[in-house]
Image (cartoon, rainbow, N blue to C red):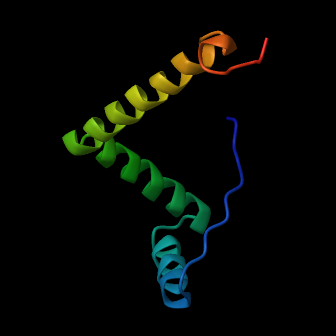
């Protein structure tokens, strides 16, 4: 599995609560956070408003790439 290290900052009381929950579930804090992140992604993907936002991002980026693909002379005066 390809992994990345990510640092998060939590208020002290939240970090302590996370440690207690992880210990009670007999897992590491890292595993508890990974599970929470996966669940968050799953829930967001199931949200129609989020899907609409993703579609808007895709369309916006498509426009940027289309401009970048055009010959430079179409939008820049090179003074030839």
Q: Quadrant of the C terminus?
A: top right
Q: Which of 54 and 47 is in front in this view?
A: 54
Residue 29 lies, in percent from the top left, at 58, 68
The single residue placed furthest to the left in the displayed view is 48
In the image, is 15 to the left or to the right of 4? left
Q: Nearer the viewer, residue 55 or 79?
A: 79
Residue 13 lies, in percent from the top left, at 50, 90
In the rendered view, tell whether residue 70 sits above or below residue 12.
Answer: above
Residue 68 lies, in percent from the top left, at 61, 20
In the rendered view, tell whether residue 78 sits above or below residue 26.
Answer: above
The single residue placed furthest to the front in the displayed view is 79
How many callouts does the rendering have? 0
The single residue placed furthest to the bottom in the displayed view is 13
Residue 60 lies, in percent from the top left, at 42, 31
Q: In which image quadrant can residue 73 be found? A: top right
- Please give the name of the residue rendered at 67% of the width and 35% of the height, measured from the top-left corner: 1
In the image, is 47 to the left or to the right of 22? left
- Please give the name of the residue rendered at 71% of the width and 54% of the height, measured from the top-left corner: 5
In the image, is 18 to the left or to the right of 30? left
Q: In which image quadrant can residue 57 be found? A: top left
């Amino acid at each position: 599995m390809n992994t990345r290290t990510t640092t998060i900052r939590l208020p002290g009381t939240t970090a302590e609560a996370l440690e207690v929950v992880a210990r009670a579930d007999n897992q590491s804090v890292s595993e508890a956070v990974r599970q929470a992140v996966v669940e968050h992604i799953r829930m967001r993907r199931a949200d129609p408003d989020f899907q609409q936002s993703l579609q808007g991002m895709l369309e916006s980026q498509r426009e940027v790439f289309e401009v970048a693909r055009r010959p430079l002379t179409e939008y820049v005066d090179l003074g030839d």
